Image (cartoon, helix red, strand yellow):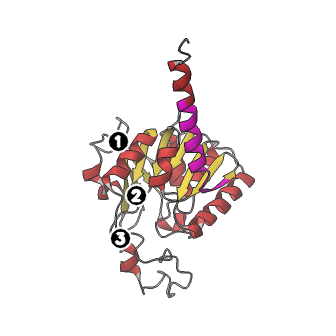
Amino acid sequence: MADDYDPAENSRKSYDVAIDALREKLASFRCERVGDATLYLGDCREILPLLPKVDAVVTDPPYGINYGKLMKGKGDGQGGLDKNRWKHYEAFDWDAQRPAPETFDAIRAAGKEAVIWGANYFSDLLPPSMRWLVWDKCQEFSLADFELAWTSQNAAGRTFRYSRPEALRDGRHHPTQKPIELMEWCLGFLPKARTILDPFMGSGTTGVACAKLGRKFIGIELEPKYFDIAVKRIDDAYRQPRLFKDEPPKPKQEALL
């Protein structure tokens, strides 16, 4: 009897089985689709390997400075006692550890380009970069005067000047929340990136910026409270579209020498 084994057909079937297994595992996570945004509730270490490669990753991971413990029992910065638990993140140890080296490898592998905020805390885990982005908060106070982002781009560094009072106009939803305009500015340096991934979505600011700029977005968040906030904020952004020229706003940037 002739051998009916077909290597190509067998390989195709094996590939189909593997893809079905990945889809089944991905389907086990809670997923919300809002406009062009796909949002997953879960651990990015489990979800990232299940996703296709995207154009760019823009994210703000935990810094590992134990900020939650430092803020425990302190006020809200406005004379209150932090009644809304804004600084608590539900658990005081949420920022006790930074992501492992393997997680940063997975983040960088997930996109063709990357922008990672707080990278001064991860500089030993990331390769040298020519382009660093700076958020200048335009004032001196007890917290940092500026924040830094590492990028995968071989281009000049840039500065965004945006005061903390301006940032608070977005509302306070998350302990390390970034301004929407800051994330829009970041996306301006990624003009060819149509699908953006944020594996540490938090309250969804990157997704809000994507909604305003007409980009597709994939977000992952571990904490259910902030996942629900992100879903609402991104949905609200789609309900209030606005025109925006998709490029970095020049008045608020300058080259770093």
Q: CA distance from mark 2 to mark 1?
A: 16 Å
Q: Amino acid at mark 1?
A: Arg
| Magenta stretch, main secondary structure class | helix
- Which one is earlier in the sequence, the residue at label 2 or at label 3? 3
- Which one is earlier in the sequence, the residue at label 2 or at label 1? 1
The residue where tag 1 is placed is: 131
Extreme top residue here? Answer: 2
* Segment tinted magenta in the rendering: 14-32
Q: Amino acid at mark 2?
A: Asp
> Looking at the figure, which quarter contains the N terminus?
top right
Query: Who's the residue at 68% across and 51% down the image?
Result: 33
- Of 4 and 223, nearer the camera is 4
Q: Is residue 199 visible in this depiction of the protein? A: no
- Which one is earlier in the sequence, the residue at label 1 or at label 3? 3
Local SS, label 1: loop
Q: Is residue 2 visible in this depiction of the protein? A: yes
The residue where tag 3 is placed is: 96
Q: Residues within 10 Å of mark 3 (few under 14, many from 20)?
A: some
Q: Position of residue 256 (x, y in %)?
A: 32, 45
| Comparing labels 2 and 1, the label whose residue is closer to the camera | 1
Q: Give left or right: position of 172 versus 93.
A: right
Q: Position of residue 164 (x, y in %)?
A: 48, 66
> Looking at the figure, which quarter contains the C terminus?
top left
| Comparing labels 1 and 3, the label whose residue is closer to the camera | 3
- Of 103 and 15, nearer the camera is 15
Q: Position of residue 12 (x, y in %)?
A: 55, 26
Local SS, label 3: loop
